[in-house]
Amino acid sequence: MQNRHPTRRTVLAATSLALAPALARSRNAASRAGGLAGVSVVHSFDPEGPGDDGAYPRGGLAAGPDGLPWGTASVGGTHNFGVLYRVTSATGIEIMASFGGGSPAIGGDPRGELVLATDGFLYGSTFWGGSESAGTVMRMDGAGGLSVAHACLEAEGYEPVAALLQASDGALYGTTQKGPSYDGYGTAFRLGLDGSFATLHAFAGAHEGSPPARPLTQAADGLLYGVAQFGGRARQGTIYRLSLAGDFELLHTFRGPEGGAPACRLVQAPDGWLYGTAVNGGANGGGTIFRLWPATGRVERVHSFPAWGQPGSSPGAGLVLASDGNFYGVTGLAFASAPGRVYRLSPDGRVQAVASIPAAWGAEAPLYESEPGVLLGTTQTGGAFGSGCVFRVEL
């Protein structure tokens, strides 16, 4: 496997005097907004600076082969098609590889989180690349070597933008937001570690929901569960499930009170419920936390966020179940005019804000627990240079 970026460069976080005032302003704004501490910036992406830094990370972080948190940024790097990086400390990251370039085309514009598979490689999706420029599934090693595990084709489903899941059978499962064919509504697929590929289901659009552009999760019953952000009979999204063989079942159509426009990977709690978040709907119109009982398809609203445009509204990412037994999530879309929040959902259903995120920073990826009591996250924009950042919250 060819290493597409043999020269790695350590990029320290922007701890210069130029960043200090920005952090001070963010913390002051957070204090005025409700007495919350601001997040601590680990690294502000700067694609115009020295080296091959990236920008605009669209996915969160995941455990890498060395145990460190790894992630991607969607642009920047040598070819301006994004970078692979790892978080090396509380104050810095290391650029491991640049996406794009090569023949056949190495994927570019990576989206979603990475997954560390049982073969020791990281896998992730790219919006662009492959023989038809329809997107790829990329394979990455611990030294930053990149190779194409699968190049998507329009006829089978294209533009994979969600994180992959390694299921109990060892295969990788994912979704595409378009296809099959030009006018398709998206697909679910299976990719074996040996390279074998199959389209499991092609979505029927208005009824089943579209696009299925969020990751799948495997529940304790062995089935795969996912959401489509729009579509369904009420046009506010759906929840569906798949067997590993591709048998499809529509479980729920969102109608507003329980949420609308779900934008998350579902996460199963110890009590068996699957929890997720929706950008819209609820009692105030600013989004919800909801839960699904897999055996019956019953959906309940757990929490309504404040009205659209208010601090802490509109969760654009799902939840993570931390080692303390609580769920944690983020709010704050890239175009939001009010500060976002890092929040805690306790097992008894109480929601509490634990940190503030400046307005319009675009916290739209799930958090990652790097060690007990420490959460890392990413923002698509914001940071010292407006190109996104990696941030840290100590609980």
Image (cartoon, rainbow, N blue to C red):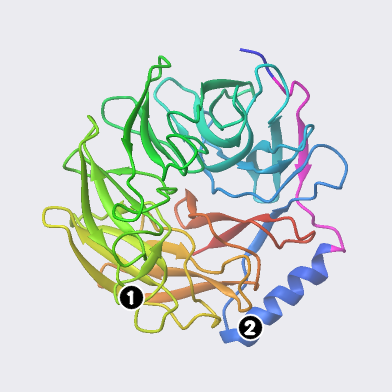
For the N terminus, the quadrant is top right
Residue 15 visible in the displayed image: yes
Q: Nearer the viewer, residue 186 or 63?
A: 186
Is 335 displayed left or right of 65 in the figure?
A: right
Instruction: Give the residue type that dot 1 points to.
Output: His
Q: Is residue 366 magenta?
A: no
Task: Identify the image quadrant of residue 25.
Answer: bottom right
Say the numbered circle drawn on residue 31.
2
Dominant secondary structure of the residues highlighted in magenta in the image: loop
Task: Identify the image quadrant of residue 101.
Answer: top right
Task: Identify the image quadrant of residue 207.
Answer: bottom left
How packed mark 2 is, by other alpha carbons closer than 10 Å (few <14, some 14-19, many 20 or more), is some
What is the count of numbered marks?
Answer: 2
Is 202 displayed left or right of 176 in the figure?
A: left
Task: State which region is magenta.
Answer: 4-18
**Which residue is disc 1 drawn over?**
303
Q: Position of residue 317 (x, y in %)?
A: 47, 59
Give the answer, above or below, for where 120 lies relative to 108. Answer: above
Instruction: Pick whichever of labels 2 and 1 is earlier in the sequence.
Output: 2
Residue 350 visible in the displayed image: no
Q: Secondary structure at mark 1?
A: strand
Q: Nearer the viewer, mark 2 or mark 1?
A: 1
Residue found at x 45% / y 82%: 306
Residue found at x 65% / y 40%: 88
Callout 2 touching callout 1 (CB < 8 Å): no
Q: Position of residue 220 (x, y in %)?
A: 19, 43
Residue found at x 81% / y 63%: 19
Q: Secondary structure at mark 2?
A: helix
Instruction: Give the residue type that dot 2 points to.
Output: Ser
Give the answer, above or below, for where 332 lies relative to 189. Answer: below
